[in-house]
Image: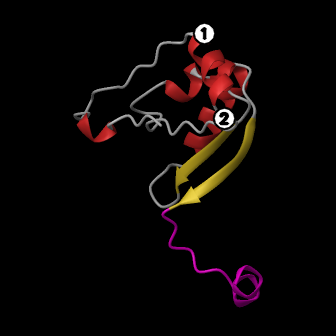
Amino acid sequence: MRRFAAEGLRAGQRAEVLADSRYWRALRQHADTVMIDSPVSDRSDTAVIVVPFVDATVLVVAAESTAANEPMLLRDEIEASGGRIAGVVMNRSTYDPPAFLKRLTG
């Protein structure tokens, strides 16, 4: 497992990923499942760069601090690059669900 040290980026710096299909093909030979946790889209194009090499993308959205149009713009960019969105996760939400939903989720 590799981890990009995003905390090492300074404000305004971006992470770059080189698209090389040989790397991704080799990785598939050694792992059944690969998850790529890319940096936030305003600091890196990683999510779009790896689209040709992944089966699907799950968008993780900071619920309380992300503008409503930002996930849709990223979705459109990923889909325009041939990617498939498998779902969206709302992270850091302070939403208090109604009681009936709480009962369903435990």
62 left or right, relative to 28: left
Q: Is residue 68 visible?
A: no
* Horizontal and vertical percent position of residue 16: 40, 20
Q: What element carries label 1?
A: helix
Q: Quadrant of the C terminus?
A: bottom right
What are the residue bounds of the magenta stretch? Answer: 92-106
- Please tell me which residue is depicted at 60% across the width and 9% down the height of the picture: 22
- 89 in magenta: no
Q: In which quarter of the image is residue 102?
A: bottom right
Q: Name the residue under label 1.
A: 22
Residue 35 on image: x %, y %: 59, 39
Residue with the mark numbered 2? 75
Q: Residue at x 62, y 17 (%)?
A: 26
Residue 49 at x, y percent in the picture: 56, 19
Q: Is residue 98 above or below residue 33?
A: below
Label 1 neighbour load within 10 Å: few <14, some 14-19, many 20+: few
At 47% across and 13% down in the image, what residue appears? 18
Depth order, front residue of 3/31: 31
Instruction: Tell me if 13 is positioned left or right of 91 in this view.
Output: left
In magenta stretch: residue 100? yes
